[in-house]
Image (cartoon, rainbow, N blue to C red):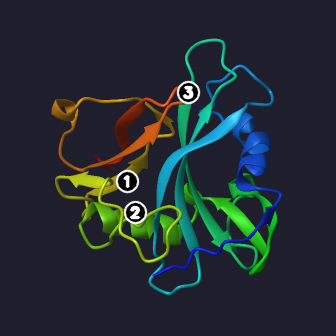
Amino acid sequence: MASIHRTTMTPTKLELLTGWLPKQTWYVGDAETPELVKAGGFRLDDPEGAVGIEFMVVVDNTTSQEPVAYLVPMSYHGAALEGAPGEALIGTSEHGVLGTRWIYDGVHDPVVMAQLGALLRGEAMPQHQSKSDAPDPTVTVHGTGPDDGLDVQVNRVLRPVEAAQRSSGRLVAGWTWPNGTAARGVLAAVAPR
């Protein structure tokens, strides 16, 4: 199980995401510099223990409409990820215990996507975002996950859904809006290739 270090990161993950998020094609905000707040998420363990895996939900408070929630799967590496496309790198940060960390958009990281598939198949357990060795029972899988004929799709812009709308092959988790209201939605789902 991954250990959560109580230390600093410079720049912080939110600072890195503030510069990275508006450059993404799926960003729906209207601000060049969003005002992001951490709103939820969870972690997965890398079976090899080499890659940190976090699924972070951030809310952009600067849109002219309602606040928007985004899911950013991230991987943390001790060196550059070979073969990753340039747009996959969110940035580098100095970790107070582990040193320089290369932080990647998890959809471009085979370790992250393999563990997400394992979670959807019931072969991995979601972990609390900020506690070591603590399963997160609020993250649920509905139905069975990917097999040879299915792919995993990550929902980047999150929408709250009612329990009745959840169908098979879905990863559901919650986040908190800036006004304190709790929401749950589909973070990832399986789809035919």
Secondary structure of the residue carrying numbered label 3? strand
Amino acid at pointer 2: Leu
Q: Amino acid at mark 1?
A: Val
Sequence-wise, which precedes: disc 2 or disc 1?
2
Q: Earlier in the sequence, mark 3 or mark 1?
A: 3
Q: Residues within 10 Å of mark 3 (few under 14, many from 20)?
A: some
Q: CA distance from mark 2 to mark 1?
A: 8 Å
Viewer-proximal residue among 10 and 149 = 10
180 left or right, relative to 172: right
Helix, strand or loop at disc 1? strand
Query: What residue is disc 2 on?
Result: 116
Q: Of the residues tagged 3 and 1, which is closer to the observer?
A: 3
Residue 63, horizontal then vertical, whole percent = 66, 19
Task: Provide the secondary structure element on which disc 2 rests.
Answer: helix
Q: Does residue 2 appear left or right of residue 5 in this picture? A: left
Badge 3 amino acid: Val
Q: To which residue does mark 1 refer?
A: 152
Q: Are marks 2 and 1 in contact (CB under 8 Å)?
A: yes
Q: Residue at x 59, y 83 (%)?
A: 50
At x 64%, y 39%, the residue is: 37
- Looking at the rendered image, the disc whose residue lies closer to the viewer, 2 or 3, is 3
- Inter-mark Cα distance, 3 to 1: 23 Å
